[in-house]
Amino acid sequence: MFASLFILLYAAHLAADYPLQTDHQAAHKADRCVAGWRANLAHAGTHAAASALALAVAVTVLGHTIKALPALLALAWITGTHAFIDRRWPVARWMRFARQEQWAQRGGAAHVDQTAHVLVLLVAVLALTR
């Protein structure tokens, strides 16, 4: 169950982060204004919907048993942390702390961002399958 849930949630993450994310969301989700928060929350909502669909596939197609409360908590965790990470300052702060400023200037922030999201999914799947 662990592997299939992780693969489904990771596929949902990739879909929400790339083909389902609008140009406007990508450009403005870290802006420090109402429009930035709106773009950020709309993008996080896409993650919630895609992840919910992934969990529904796990239950209906693969026959996994996932209780409602743990599923809702996992969706809240995925959605909330995604919105937080995508504000961009947490990744920038981590890269400064880890002395990765030069790598950040060469595009490394995108890799750190995606790694953070994958670790979030790992925690969610561990919680769902414990």
Image (tube, rainbow, N blue to C red):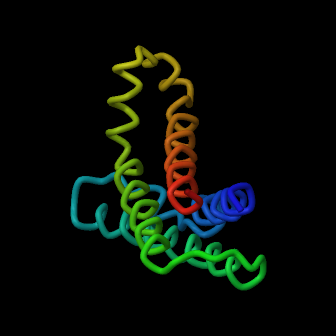
Screen quadrant of the C terminus:
bottom right
Count all numbered tags in the image, as a single digit: 0
Q: For the point 65% across and 73% down, which residue is it?
A: 54
Q: Estimate the x, y position of residue 6 in percent, counting from the top left.
A: 67, 57
Screen quadrant of the N terminus:
bottom right
Q: For the point 74% across and 62% down, which residue is it?
A: 4
Seen in the picture, residue 13 relative to 66 is either above or below; the reply is above
Task: Looking at this view, name the residue that lies furthest to the left.
Answer: 33
Task: Looking at this view, name the residue that lies furthest to the front.
Answer: 130
Q: Is residue 118 left or right of residue 84?
A: right
Q: Quadrant of residue 66?
A: bottom right
Q: For the point 41% across and 68% down, which residue is it?
A: 73
Seen in the picture, residue 2 relative to 45 is either above or below; the reply is above
Task: Looking at this view, name the residue that lies furthest to the bottom.
Answer: 60
Depth check, front residue: 56 or 100? 56
Q: Estimate the x, y position of residue 129 in percent, counting from the top left.
A: 59, 60
Depth check, front residue: 120 or 85? 120
Depth check, front residue: 100 or 53? 53
Q: Is residue 56 left or right of residue 93?
A: right
Q: Is residue 93 left or right of residue 46?
A: left
Depth check, front residue: 114 or 8? 8
Q: Is residue 29 left or right of residue 17?
A: left
Seen in the picture, residue 96 relative to 7 is either above or below; the reply is above
Q: Estimate the x, y position of residue 15 in percent, counting from the top left.
A: 65, 65
